[in-house]
Every structure is written in C-alpha cells, then in structure tokens.
Image (cartoon, rainbow, N blue to C red):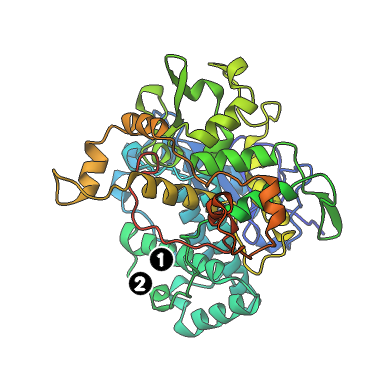
Amino acid sequence: MNKTLEYHKYPGLFVCCHDCGRNVYHKQSGKKICNHPLERQFYKALIKIPNTGGERTSNNLSSKTFDEAVKEFLEFKHRVYNPHLYEENTELEKPELLIDAVAMYVDYLHDVGIPHHKKKYLSESHIKTTIQFLKEFVQFVSKKKYDLEKFKLASISDSLVGEYCKYIEDKGNSNYTFNDKIKALKTFFNYLILTKGYPLKNIWKDVSMKSESQTDITIAPKDFYDLLDVISPENSRAQIGKTKRNMFRPWLKDVIMLKAYTGRRNIEVFMMKWNMVKFEGDTPMYIMSPNNKLNQLQNNTKEMELQYAYVPIGVELLDLLTTLGLDAKKNCDEYIIAPEEPYRKSMERYTSKYFAFFFNKLGRDYNIQFKHLRQTYVTAEDMFLRRGASMQHSDYKTTAKHYIDRKEIAKDMVKRGFRVFPQRPSKEIQRTLPQDTVSNKKDPAILQGLDYQSGAYRNRTDDLLTASQTL
C-alpha cells in the first residue's frame, strides 16, 4: 500500500500534509520526514501572480490522484492568469473547515496574494512561531477524536476552548507561553472576522491572560562584573537532552559588554560594524546603528530610507572598542563582534542560553537574562539625561519624536562622561569586603564602591523616549 500520494515533478504542484504542514516529497538533511497517514495528505498548487513582482497565491486541491490534480492545477492557474474571465465570481470563498482556514491564514501571514500596499512584511521568526501555535491547537483537536476533514470553525465551543487551556497548562508552559498561544488564536479569529468577514464570535477573547513578571528589570553592577569573571572555557559544558554542549564562546564576554554599553537589540548588536562608529575629528562620538525594529515595521530597505539609533560612545564603550581594535579597524566594513563568524542569526539565537548558563553559576536566588542588559542601559541613560519634560509641548513624546536631534544628545553624553555601571572597584577593595557586607570603616574608596556591592537591584522604567532607545 502506498504511503504517499502519487507524485511526479511538476512546477507549482506539491503534496503536503494537513497535520505537519510539510512538503511530503521535499527531503531535507536533518529534517524529519512526514510519517502521517496517507489520508492526511493533499495536493497543493502554488502559482506566481502575473505582473506583481513575484507575489504568489496557493490553493489546496480536492483531487486524490495525480492526473486529476494536474487538471485542477491547470484550471486554477487559468483563473489566476485570467482573472477578468471570472469577475462574476469575485466574492472570496470562506472555507468552513478549521484546517482550510488555518492554511488560508498562513498564506496571509506570508503576504501571498496580498496587494502590495497591504503587505505586512512579518518576520520569519514571528510567522514560524504563529504557525507552531496554530498547529498545536489543530493537533489537540485531532487528539480529541474529531475528524479534521469535517471539523468546522463553528464547532469550536467554550467547552473545547476550556479543555485546550487546561491542556497547555498541564504541559507546564510558562505564563508567557500560555499567553502567547492564546494571543495567536485570538489574532487568527480577528483575521477571520475582521478581514474575511466570517460571522463568528471571537471565542478566544474570553480567555483570561495569566500574570507575567515585570520586564523592567535592571542588572546590578555586582552581578554584571561577577558574570564577566565567571565566563571561561572551564566547566562550560551543559547537559542539553542526551548530549553535552559547550556553552563557552570566545566572543561571549565581548557581546555582553557591547550590548550593556549600547543598549541595542540582540540582532543589532551582532550586526554592528566598525564603519558605524562616527568620529568628530579624531574622537569617536557615537555608533550609527540601524533601528532594526522600526525599519522592519516601515519596510525600509533602501539606504536612504533607513532609520538609525545614535549610541553615544561613553567611557565603558570606548574602552571596549579600543580593546577590540578601534584604531586599526576605523571605517572598516567588518563586524565588531566575531567577524569570522558568518552565521549571525545563529549567534544571536544561542547567546541568551550561554548568558543564562554562566549566570546560574553565580548561585543567585533570582534570575536575570541577556535581554535585561537593554533595560539596564535605558535606565542608566534616563537617569543621566534626566529628561521627560518639554518647554514646547504638553506631551514630551511629541518633542522626543519630532524635534530632538539625537546625534547632538549622543555627543553631549560623551562629553559628560556617560557610563552604564559605576567604575569597578579594584580587586584589592573587593578582597577586603565579604560578599553583601559593608565595612563600618569610612574609607572613601570603600564608600565609592557601595553601589557595586548591591544585590538584586531592580528599577522601574516607564515610557522612556531617550537618545537611542525610541522603539
């Protein structure tokens, strides 16, 4: 008995699986193959729309044999290439089955068949996560013994939603993950109701979100410096599943310091190059870093369209850049961090795990994460600038967004000696003070180091629209 639908190579025609979404005949090294039963497979057509610059549209075909699928594919292609012949049928179909609606939504996420001015340009990571969450719900419905070939959107009841919420709670998902999964389903239903006009109630809106811990956490100077001290190749292997992995990277300390001293997002830190360092005379003043999030939201791809953050080169950042070779690398089109590493996104993806591994070695009774370096920077920057009021506008956001020249603010911060952390006490002072204790001796050097001795420092950051942190 055949395990897959019959298939011969035919441009634009594929065999896919309803359960895992894989292209059944597309084998990739290291990727799992589809092991779902034959009845879960279907033929899918994918066609480029003429005169759109590469936009595509897809259709799940009803045919169950290859010859019939080719005929149905050609009919669909004719409709795509000759839309004027089918103008009387311009009303878009609204698939009733859950699996078909999810497939339609996935195309929507990828901007397939979407007019140019309405495209969203969502990141691949966001799309991948959304698909994963939707697929988990579909698999849950299947495990409840519902026939996915007959299960309609209208069949999703309060009872089923409650069972699914309990299911993901029992899996031990964090509150963040629980909320993200429910939000994905809420957004899916919003698309069906608001964009496609389905006469449905968004049943997911009734699900109460779980509390999440605060995100405005800063890192204490002691934690920061102790973390740098503990990072080394020694005892750096972690048990991940059945294998042990080396969590040390030669560039790990450098990237932690670069993020701490610039406050930029992870991918922006890994993409920083030496030619982004801007000088005034012989003095390095700021790093002109592309604002990745804003550029993506605005679909800014041309050089003249890009939005930038102007990161002042404070005392600590200047020391780091000098150590990494600023004088020799001036105006060089080379990455600041590990220029020999080609896979920047992979570096970004795993750095948070490396950071967590070494921080756990400190034995603290609280956790901090790689991302908290950004909050730490924003807090230090706001305290240094002491802004937040405007003489020109009642709302400071207006001033910050439209009137402030951030390049000049960055320069001023450099001249005023901006730092993220207090200067580290000498090793000699560290040895005279037991951890988390303070001597009664009123030695000026020791008093200067009191901030360094603080424990799990936490500080709120409100809506800070400061020099380099907008969006």
- Residue 274 against residue 201 in the figure, above or below: above
Label for residue 254?
none
Disc on the earlier residue, 1 or 2: 1
Marks 1 and 2, how far apart in space?
8 Å
Q: Residue at x 61, y 73 (%)?
A: 140
| In-front residue for pair 310/28 | 310
Looking at the picture, tell me which residue is in the foreground, 372 or 142: 372
Q: Secondary structure at mark 1?
A: helix
Few, some or many C-alpha atoms within 10 Å of disc 1 (few <14, some 14-19, many ≥20)? many
Q: Is residue 73 visible?
A: no
Image: 215 above or below 115: below
Residue 457 point in image, percent of width and height: 53, 62
Q: Residue furthest bottom?
A: 159
Q: Are marks 1 and 2 in contact (CB under 8 Å)?
A: yes
Rendering coords of residue 84 (x, y %): 31, 37
Residue at 47% over, 55% down: 104
Q: Is residue 53 visible from the viewing direction of this image?
A: yes
Q: Amino acid at mark 2?
A: Leu
Identity of the residue drawn at 42% across and 31% down: 414
Q: Give whichever of 262, 199 is nearer the camera.
A: 262
> Taking 44 as reference, is 241 left or right?
right
Q: Secondary structure at mark 2?
A: loop
| Pointer 2 residue | 200
Classify residue 19 as left or right of residue 122. right
| Residue mark closest to the camera, 1 vs 2 | 1
Query: What's the residue type where badge 1 is placed?
Result: Phe
The quadrant of the image that shows the N terminus is bottom right
Pick the residue in front: 86 or 241. 241
Q: Which residue is mark 1?
A: 189
